[in-house]
Image (cartoon, coloured by chain):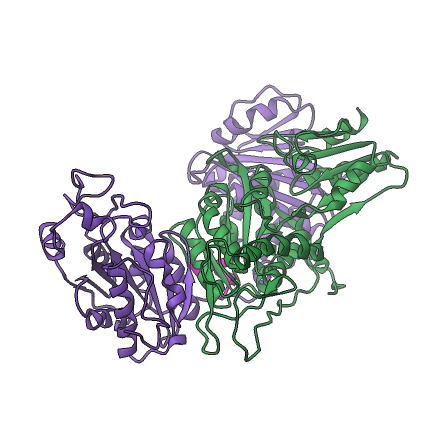
Chain colours: A green, B purple
Amino acid sequence: MHKKNKDSIVLTDGSCLIIEALARAGADAFIGYPITPANLLYQYGSQRMELMLSAPDEITTLQWMSGLSMTGKLPVTATSFPGFALMTESVNMAYMMELPMVIILVQRLGPATGTATCGAQGDLLLLNGIISGGHPIPVLATSDFEDCWVLAAKSAEIAITLRTPVILLTSKEEVMTHRSFNMKNLSDISPVVRKEYQSAQKYKPYAATNLVPDFIPVGQNKHQVRFNASTHDQAGILQHSTKEAIDNTIRLEEKITKRMQEFQYYILDEQEDANTLLVAYGISASAARSATSQLREKKKKVSLLIPQTMLPVQDIYLTKCLEYQKVIIAEESINNQFGRILFGQSIPDHVTCIGSIAKMITPEQIVEEVYL
Amino acid sequence: MSTNLLNTDSLPYCKGCGHDLIAKHTTKALEKLNYKALDVIIVTDIGCHGIIDKCLNTHTVHGLHGRSVALGAGIALGLNHPDKKIIVFIGDGGATIGLQHILEAARLNLNMTVMVHNNMLYGMTGGQTSGLTPYGFRTTTSYDGNPFGGYDLCGLLQSAGSSYACRILGIGDISDKLAVAIGTKGFSLAEVIEICPGFGMKLNPKRKLGEIAESSGRKPGEWINRRDKFEMPVTKKTNNLFERAPLIKKEFTHYLKQKTTILISGSAGEGIQLAATILSKASMRSGLSVTQKGSYPVTVGVGFSAAEVNLSDKHIFFHGITQPDIAIITSEDGLAYAKQRIKQMQNGMLIIDTSLEKPITKAEIVERDFRMVGAKYAALYAILYYALKTGVISTEAVFKTLDQEGLQDKFPLALIKDALVK
């Protein structure tokens, strides 16, 4: 991937970057159901994706996407918590069936319908337990416009490579705010190449190579294909709890935990001799970046960690948080969700969280906390 | 009876179960219509019928309870192939919980066929009442007989627009009737009425299918709509969304000394967001970095409309604005929304329409009759006035932006220019 040299400045938004990046990465279908603050994504999806359909509800959305995925499409949708809640069972189905798709989750203030036009970072813990059995689902979080571009494409790549639904986590402030943006900063994106099963031997839909089964679309005339959301063996036949079937269920867990090590994305900007580490993802990363810049201008040494691969959580996040004398996690919630994922209920004394509800965390809040 | 589509004639159902009949006669009907195994995708729901997969030589998909029609619809949309046949097996319980999916597939007239195994109760979970259980039919949760009638599924389907729906008694050779449904171009559904031997027969001894259907007003029949088969909609697409985001080149000079935060607040429908976009693009044309976000109630057509704009000669990491440096207020709605923030301003400038009450604030107050050019144009006049008053960007940059955006004829520019110089 390379970047361009010539300035190309536009006024754009994160929604536009996400959809264009997904389309260039090979996403070819968008199924939409309106929900604020994800509507811009829907609008762009309708203009850009080869196949676009308006679903009557979010359960249908995920089911249509699953059917499309079985035929070899890479479908995308965008929603917010109330819609995502309806999708939950179907996300589990797609996970079990091993269907590539990308779900853009635009966080807004909850609980329930909360405030549709107010941003938040309140859905990470939900995602951490969304799959029954505790299996991890890949979650990437955008922290700026470049992430909207790069991580959207990576979401498509992960979905295809690991045959799994992928959640692209963002928030109202990231996808609805316009910015002047220099497109020369955007790297080229090539379509993800999907390798299909080529052998003449009988196809076993859930026989895995390197933990991921080979794909072949349903409906073709070479091999019988079976997809199954219930516990199933390698042939895709429903089983109660035979060893082969349970091994397959265990493989699903291993597939994500092990293979996601190939997709560890984060920004670690360390200063030598810094005692303080700022940790922020998503929208709060913008405040953390600004705070870091302000602190360094004042010669205050500080390091910055911006997790981008949120789930499964990467070891390095915990490692880095334990290396520093003082760790400040900034998250637009009131319960330090990322900290709880890292440390459970026993968050160490050297780790503090700047939380917020119904308003963005400001750089000044972070700077103040650094000096405390 | 074994067929090319079934790999056994011993299906895993209770003795006397109508599911056996439906599975065998569906495959028989498919063979009559010359379908090959791999031209057929059978999607099964949750329920006893759903354990048929292993007996099928077709492609098989086993999904969630009630969602199989939507899942099959997704396959139909993805394949969109006239020689491929998507068949969904679903029970009366699945048809109840997934009724919306069935109606939606019928509305779109997707190329697929749904076989409803209507044994009038939830068999797999213990014989509970479903939405298709007829009035008076006894189940394990209605021992005195169902106090309510069931849906007229075929009637609903016709209303929703399915090409073909039929209700069949699950007795004898039903393959020809199923073949009519399967052979339909567009959406079709066959509701096959049967009695669950595990619960229905025991709880309703001596009752016969025909009598149940007759007495509940659910007689066998056909419901037909003459419709064109489904065609994938062809709509105009762009192959690059950025084509709709024009490049903005630096053509003017700015005189911004430090990052400036601007709140523009007025009424919905009075061009606040457009004015903010014009200010943003004019600032970009002057070499500045900008962020712009809108705030408005969920009912976008009434009440306030506000925009927050950051201007800086450096990259802007954080776009949130707590207290603005500049507040531009053009209406009562806008003032009501911004009043508290204006009161907390310790410096900066409040640019406000003369008609409005002036809040107590430490910001410099500048008033002007912005609304005299018309309520819809007041915000543009106000940002031009801001440019003229502060000199941060030139009014030429704003006018050039209007020109580039093709908006010069949308505003009374002569009137606004005249007002500006007065």
Relative placement, left or right, of B151 versus B391 is left
Residue at the (78%, 29%) spot, across then down: A350
Image coords of residue B104 (percent x, y): 32, 56
Relative placement, left or right, of A107 versus A372 is left
Residue at the (23%, 53%) spot, across then down: B197
Is residue B163 depicted above or below A121 in this figure?
Answer: below
- Camera-side residue of A52 and B15: B15
Specify the quadrant that holds the C terminus of chain B. Answer: top right
Relative placement, left or right, of A294 versus A287 is right
Residue at the (55%, 68%) spot, across then down: A215
Q: Quadrant of residue A301?
A: top right
Q: Residue furthest right?
A: A273
- Camera-side residue of B56 and A327: B56
Image coords of residue A357 (percent x, y): 59, 30
The boundaries of the magenta stretch are A45-53
Residue at the (19%, 52%) spot, across then down: B152
Image coords of residue A117 (percent x, y): 51, 38
Residue A62 in view: yes
Q: Is residue B47 magenta?
A: no
Q: Quadrant of residue B180?
A: bottom left
- Camera-side residue of A297 and B98: B98
Specify the quadrant that holds the N terminus of chain B. Answer: bottom left
